[in-house]
Amino acid sequence: MTSSRKPLDPRITEQRNPRTAAIDLASSLEIVDLLNAEDRTVADAVATQRHAIARAIDIAEKSFRAGGRLFYVGAGTSGRLGVLDASECPPTFGVDPEMVQGIIAGGLPALTTAQEGAVDSPQAAQDDIAARFVGAKDFVIGIAASGTTPYVRAALDEAMKRKAATGIIACSPPHDDLLQRVSVAILPITGPEAVTGSTRMKAGTATKLVLNTITTGVMIRMGKTFGNLMVDLRATNNKLRDRSERILIEACGVDRERARELLKEADGRVKLAIVMQKLGVDRKAAERALEEGGGVIRRVTRDDPPPV
């Protein structure tokens, strides 16, 4: 029999999940199966937000091409996920660490130790946004699994005052007044957690999928890949030199020796080496061509995509 009693908390992420109500009596294998069954719903929830995520990618690209930055702002798990995604952009795509930044309530100590009071501090959020001189060229995305985090709301309010583009990622619908004011709202509604209120689970997984898609999508739009090859990396150690050589062999059809020569001539910059080889030009000419093509190799070389 289904209860018609009104939930004690309207936030979906804080409600009890009837499918896992007896999980405390489950065996280890049953726990695994119950959690896996819940996790399988996450990708579908994210897919419902495909248009909003694409909109966020477009806003981020516009911001980057104007010299702006992307900020993720969150508390607790949401903040940690933002910091994680931001920190992975420089090694993956060769970008400046300032380009994508994660801001977490409570600062760096909150990455490893819970700073529970920080979530309720609007003034700290305003100060954190001000300290980074957020302005009209920037894009600030708040992450709040429950949709109600005071720190995130205050950070977005401050970003709006500074004329930045804004977005919200939440797994429970935020208040309508916030939805009407942000540039984009991404709302993968993942439902009640297997363990009530533990938003590091389904909500956290959905958030990570969304963040990965935004940064990967905008980096592709910015020309950080050639096809699906990561080309905007620098060969700064043995592992990356080997990867860089293999990318050149794959993309340009050269042998290992020629790949090494190209990397040396391009000062270790794979994207530049590809353009040099394909156009038969020196480094300076390749740099000019890439600048004119917005950093996208195919706009410069006119290569057709490989057959599927």
Image (cartoon, helix red, strand yellow):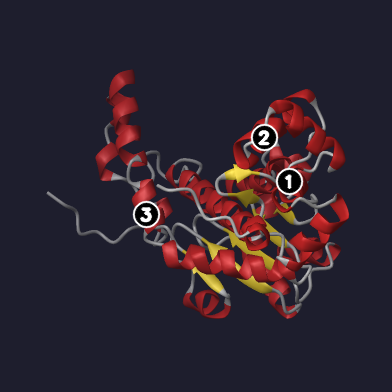
Q: Earlier in the sequence, mark 1 or mark 3?
A: 3
Q: Earlier in the sequence, mark 2 or mark 1?
A: 2
- The residue tagged with tag 3: helix, strand or loop? helix
User: With 62 as the anchor, is 46 left or right in this view?
Assistant: left
Percent x, y of residue 191: 35, 52
Q: What residue type is labelled 2?
A: Val
Find the distance from the CA under tag 1 to the CA under tag 3: 44 Å
Q: Which residue is drawn at 41% across and 54% down?
A: 46
Q: Is residue 219 above or below residue 26?
A: below
Q: Earlier in the sequence, mark 3 or mark 2?
A: 3
> Residue reaching furthest left?
1
Q: Which residue is drawn at 75% across and 60% down?
A: 290
Residue 268 is marked as none
Labels 2 and 1 touching (C-beta < 8 A): yes
Percent x, y of residue 1: 12, 49
Q: Is residue 94 above or below residue 62?
A: above
Q: What residue type is labelled 1?
A: Gln
Find the distance from the CA under tag 3 to the CA under tag 2: 44 Å
Percent x, y of residue 150: 62, 63
Characterize the local packing of mark 1: few (<14), some (14-19) or many (20 or more) Cα atoms within 10 angstroms: many
Label 2 sits on residue? 254
**Mark 3 against mark 2, which lies toward the viewer?**
2
Label 3 sits on residue? 45
